[in-house]
Amino acid sequence: MTSSHQFEQSHLRLLGLAGFASMASMRIGDPMLVVLGQEFQVSTGEASGVVSVFAVVYGLMQLFYGPLGERFGKLRVVSLAVTACALFSALTALSVNLPMLLVMRGLMGAAAAGIIPLSMAWVGDQVPYERRQETLAKLMSATVIGMMSGLWFGGFAADTLGWRSAFVLLAAMFALAAVLLWRARQKSPAPAATQPPSLIASFRLTGQLLGTPRVRLILTVTAAEGALVFGAMAFMPTHLHQQFGLSVVAAGSVMMLYGVGGLLYSQMARRWLAWLGERGLVRTGAALVAVGLLVLAWGSGVWLGMLACLMTGLGFYMLHNTLQVQATQMAPAARGSAVTLFACSLFFGQSTGVLIMAQSVDMGWLAYAFTGAALGVVGLGAVVYRLVGRHVSP
């Protein structure tokens, strides 16, 4: 194994640890909504602000992290973001009312926004296109496990230890990742002597990217994906609790199957790509998500709920990882800005979806909302199918 490959693999593992904690922090509030509503004496829809505020701020901050990564270096900015996450996670555990909790979750979203997208951009810089889907899938494995762990432990903590304990554990994980990343950066070889762009030039470049038709199309599709899939996902534990009669911790445990579906994809990414091709992944993924949401909406047995979560997870990651690869290649000369714009669109879409779903849950219309999301994913899959077909290699 060459030293450059060892460097790539060691940093990929550390970025995976940071991505694990970041995704756990993003999803850890989903199974807590019922408990948070009871503690702060608000409806479940109002409590869902802990999910939507994270997504809104996460998406907004991408407009800043892209230029910061271009100017100061992607790994340096990731290390600072992980350090800030450790601090804000600890402060979140000390929240005494819902407004304070919302502010702390917003700050967590602001810090976490600099981790996964810039890690993806770093992979795009280091890994050739032909190996990129497989490498991004490895990074995605860590984030999927983080999502699963966040969903399960969020429900477990809410039911047993208290929801605050979940954020204490998150703070410890972020602190460990921060220490390891700073140590790894100190041991890394010095980068080639190049003049990084100024902040003003980096922000100007972001505007130029938005003027490119293909970039705008990818970002629009990504926002729609976030609204349809992530918006529905935020309320899957609530639906499992209300319609399937599961406890909060059991609903969070069943939702882990969503992550298992993602792992089935990420661990076999090379084979899936060989069997189906990029366009086949899009078509199969959209179909699995749509069927999974419909089964979840109208099914009545726990086993059907489990199957629906597994199908939705597998389908989503087939579709989403293909979009991620497109994002890393839509502007190779400004990959940090391009990938963070991709994440910005994804999480603005998610926040919109969560807000719409929040209205549905308070009115008892979640099943109809899931059905609408399923139909939307079918249309989305058709658009992405054509988009991938027009892919231009570097």
Image (spheres, helix red, strand yellow):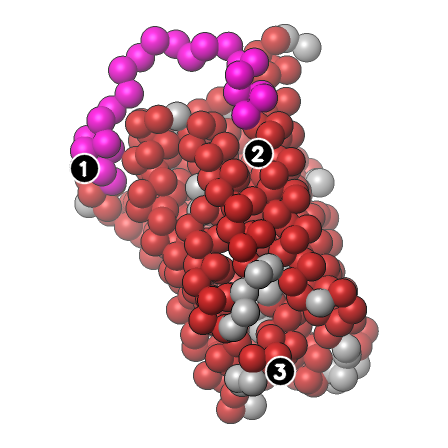
Quadrant in the picture for the C terminus? top left
Residue drawn at (71%, 54%), measured in percent from left and top?
149
Q: What kind of element bears circle 2?
A: helix
Q: Residues within 10 Å of mark 3 (few under 14, many from 20)?
A: few
Left/right placement of residue 90 relative to residue 65 reads: right
Reply above or below: 314 against 227. above
Query: Is 84 part of what is drawn in magenta?
Result: no
Query: Is 204 part of what is drawn in magenta?
Result: yes
- Say which mark, if any, is on residue 178: 2
Reply above or below: 126 against 165. above
Please identify, in this view, whether the residue under mark 3 or under mark 1 is nearer the observer.
Answer: 3
Which range of residues does the magenta coloring cover?
182-206
Q: Residues within 10 Å of mark 1 (few under 14, many from 20)?
A: few
Q: Can the viewer see residue 22?
A: yes
The span from disc 3 to disc 2 (Cα, nearest Å) is 34 Å
Q: Which is more N-terminal, label 1 or label 3?
A: 3
Q: Position of residue 131 (x, y in %)?
A: 56, 27
The span from disc 3 to disc 1 (Cα, nearest Å) is 46 Å
Reply above or below: 23 against 299. above
Q: Which is more N-terminal, label 1 or label 2?
A: 2
Q: Are marks 3 and 1 in contact (CB under 8 Å)?
A: no
The residue identified by callout 3 is 38
Q: Position of residue 185 (x, y in %)?
A: 53, 20
Q: What kind of element bears circle 3?
A: helix
* Kind of residue indicated by mark 2: Ala
* Kind of residue indicated by mark 1: Arg
